[in-house]
Image (tube, grey):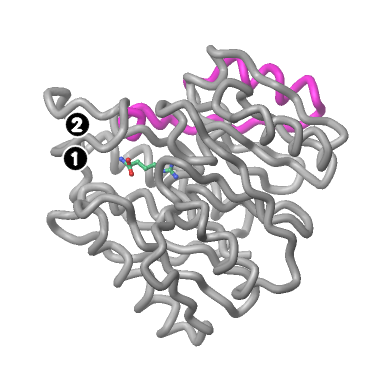
Amino acid sequence: MCPPDYFDVIYAINPWMDTSVKVNVEEAKKEWSCLVEIYKGFNIQVELLSAQKNLPDMVFSANGSFAIGDTALISSYRYKERQPEAQFHRSWFKEHGFDIQETDGITYEGEGDSLLVDQNILQGWGFRSDQAIKNVLIAAFPDYQVQMLHLIDERFYHLDTCLFPINSKLIFYYKPAFDSASIKLLNRIFTNAIAVTDKEALSFGLNSIIVGENVVLPAHAAKFAERIKSHGFHVIKAKMGEFGKSGGAVKCVTNEIW
Ligand code: ARG
């Protein structure tokens, strides 16, 4: 995770970002710190990247890399505004002894678009990551199946905004964000692929984190929270209002190292 010390909306690279909307950095810091405390309460080890001036989106650490075991694939961001972030992920993984893999120029935004569930890497492409990343993923993570999912609704520009995987059988997803072949694929892989409503998706309900039987989700995703509870999970709500101004929530600010 990376603290939101320099968090701001000074450019617009997704439809949620409006540079005329003011960000409250103090509030963002509070929201982020609460989330860190929630994770620590689950005995999750939280490692920090230090925030960098002029990189207002660096708090969205999910987008900089994707690591399984001792291998870390470093992102190659779509937009020049975020490209300098990758080096900080690279340095962290190098310092911690990971085998570093690069995308060799193929655009890729890490865990924003790569979601690991069981033996499958679900890989979103279309807005941020390129379709050609498939072969890079296969080479970097040979023990996993790479499942390509085409994103078609620009409001859901990263896979983690429109799909929340629970386990090898159950996922929640927002249908209009995917092309028809991807919807079929999801229903082939998962016996229980549950489509959520516009309201649930637009409140960033799917941008959540699961820890055992607990789901940490954005506090404003009230409807999705009810749905999650009805599946027997315990819900922990995290205020994420400031990050919503930049098009993100719980998962976006959390890079899970598998
Ligand atoms: N403003 C950031 C961007 O557009 C938000 C990233 C959100 N991250 C995510 N994993 N969906 O790149």
Q: Quadrant of ligand 1?
A: top left
Give the image location of residue 71, x and y in percent.
57, 77
SS label for mark 2: loop
Q: Which residue is mark 1?
A: 8
| Residue 225 among magenta residues | yes
- In this view, the residue in front, 22 or 236, is 22
User: Residue at image x 52%, y 48%?
Assistant: 113
User: Residue at image x 78%, y 45%?
Assistant: 167
Q: Determine if the C-beta at disc 1 is less than 8 A from ligand 1.
A: no
Q: Quadrant of residue 109?
A: bottom left
| Residue 243 among magenta residues | yes
Q: Which residue is mark 2?
A: 23
| Label 2 neighbour load within 10 Å: few <14, some 14-19, many 20+ | some
Is 210 located above or below residue 114 in the figure? above
- In this view, the residue in front, 239 or 128, is 128
Query: As shown in the figure, which amino acid type bears the numbered disc 2?
Result: Val
Q: Tell me whether circle 2 and circle 1 mark residues in contact (CB < 8 Å).
A: yes
Left or right, 247 with reference to 80 = right
Q: Quadrant of residue 134?
A: bottom right
Query: As shown in the figure, which amino acid type bears the numbered disc 1?
Result: Asp
| Label 1 neighbour load within 10 Å: few <14, some 14-19, many 20+ | many
Q: Which residues are magenta?
A: 220-244
Q: CA distance from mark 2 to mark 1?
A: 6 Å
SS label for mark 1: loop
Give the image location of residue 150, x and y in percent.
56, 39
